[in-house]
Image (cartoon, rainbow, N blue to C red):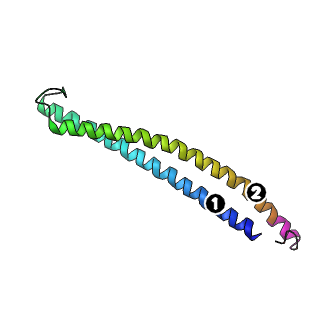
Amino acid sequence: MKVRDSALRAKRFEASEKGRKVASLEAMIREFETMISDLSRQISVEEERTGVRDAGHFAYSTFAKSAAQRRSNLATSLGDLKAKLDVARRDYEDAAAELSKLEPADDRDRAIRKIDPRAMVG
């Protein structure tokens, strides 16, 4: 029974780690979305301040250019994170399904041992 208990603990740990990974990716995605929104607002304010909205214009703000580049980089990273989140969610769902298959069997085994403690020695 010790092998089964350690396998169950390992599956629980695996599922909880995958759950933490999903939560971490979701938090990073929210943070990136907030940063992208802030950068968009800063670019708009800078364009309003300078009066130049054309990024190709010679007088376009270097701050606005760099903020737009950073926003673009964050948007690319955000897309990558969303793809990783999809994979992480599937991994978590698979691990949770495997764990749910093991746990009912473990509960059933405990019930049998309560009735007959000699049952399932191992």
Residue 99 screen position, x and y as percent: 68, 55
Residue lying at 40% horizontally and 45% vertically, measured from the top left: 30
Residue 106 screen position, x and y as percent: 76, 62
Compared to residue 108, the image places residue 24 above or below, namely: above
Q: Quadrant of residue 33?
A: top left
Q: Does label 2 or label 1 sit earlier along the sequence?
A: 1
Residue lying at 86% horizontally and 73% vertically, measured from the top left: 117
Q: Which residues are magenta?
A: 110-117
Identify the element where label 2 is drawn: helix
Residue lying at 71% horizontally and 67% vertically, measured from the top left: 5
Q: Amino acid at mark 1?
A: Arg
Residue 32 screen position, x and y as percent: 36, 44
Instruction: Estimate the spatial distance between the alpha carbons at disc 2 and disc 1, rounded to whole Å.
Output: 13 Å
Identify the element where label 1 is drawn: helix
Which quadrant does the C terminus fall into? bottom right
| Crowd around label 1: few <14 · some 14–19 · many ≥20 (10 Å) | some
Residue lying at 69% horizontally and 62% vertically, measured from the top left: 8
Compared to residue 27, the image places residue 5 above or below, namely: below
Compared to residue 4, the image places residue 97 above or below, namely: above
The residue beneath circle 1 is: 12
Which quadrant does the N terminus fall into? bottom right
Q: Quadrant of residue 16?
A: bottom right
Compared to residue 32, the image places residue 47 above or below, namely: above
Main secondary structure found in the magenta portion:
helix
Please name which of the two marks, 2 or 1, marks the residue nearer to the observer.
1
- Magenta run includes residue 113: yes
The residue beneath circle 2 is: 104
Q: Amino acid at mark 2?
A: Pro
Residue 111 screen position, x and y as percent: 82, 65
